[in-house]
Amino acid sequence: MKPTSREILQSISNECHHQLTYYTFNTTTLQVTAKYREGRLAGLRYLSELTWYYLQEEKRIIQQFDAQIIKQLEQYASLEENDYKEGLFSTLKEIHERVQEIQKKS
């Protein structure tokens, strides 16, 4: 199964943090110039911030998705009470609750 975008971003973030620690604290054992180390650390910090940004974007997508479900519930609240409305609301509420549960876990 293909990894999700979240899993890929978390993997990149973990690798960046690992290398940040490695290049920050191994000043005597690494055979690299100070300028190389400085450039490497700058790149790793940038990538770390970039992965954090996109992980936050992913959270916002879920929030926007849930907001759309709520909007649909409000929009169709004035429908006449019948089986169609009951089925529609049942489905939307079920998914809304599932999204809420998932957000609480993460």
Image (cartoon, rainbow, N blue to C red):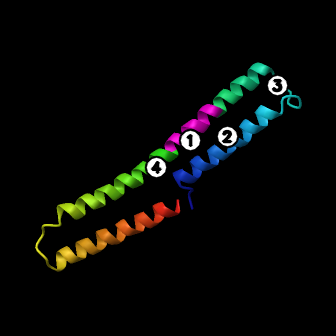
The label on residue 51 is: 1
**61 to 34, vertically: above or below:** below
Q: Badges 2 and 1: C-beta atoms under 8 Å apart?
A: yes
**Separation of residues labelled 1 and 3 (CA atoms):** 26 Å
- Residue at figure coordinates x 63%, y 49% from the top left: 11
Q: CA distance from mark 2 to mark 1?
A: 9 Å
* Residue farthest along the left direction in this orientation: 80
N-terminal-most mark, 2 or 1: 2
Disc 1 residue type (three-letter)? Thr
Q: Amino acid at mark 4?
A: Glu
Q: Residues within 10 Å of mark 1 (few under 14, many from 20)?
A: many
Mark positioned earlier in the residue sequence (4 or 2) = 2
The reply to whether discs 4 and 2 touch (Cβ–Cβ < 8 Å) is no
Question: Which of marks 3 and 1 precedes in the sequence?
Answer: 3
- Residue that mark 4 sits on: 58
Q: Residue at x 69, y 44 (%)?
A: 15
Which residues fall within the magenta stretch?
45-54
Q: Residue furthest front?
A: 104
The residue where tag 3 is placed is: 32
Crowd rating for badge 2 (residues with CA inside 10 Å; few <14, some 14–19, many 20+): many
The residue indicated by pointer 2 is: 16
- Circle nearer the N terminus (3, 2): 2
What residue lies at 75% left-to-right and 23% top-to-bottom? 36
Dot 4 alpha-carbon crowd within 10 angstroms: few under 14, some 14 to 19, many 20 or more: some
Mark number, residue 79: none
Q: What residue type is disc 3 on? A: Val
Mark 3 neighbour density, 10 Å: few (under 14) some (14–19) many (20 or more): few
Q: What separation in Å lies between label 3 and label 4 (alpha carbons)? A: 37 Å
Whether tag 1 and tag 4 are in contact, CB under 8 A, the answer is no
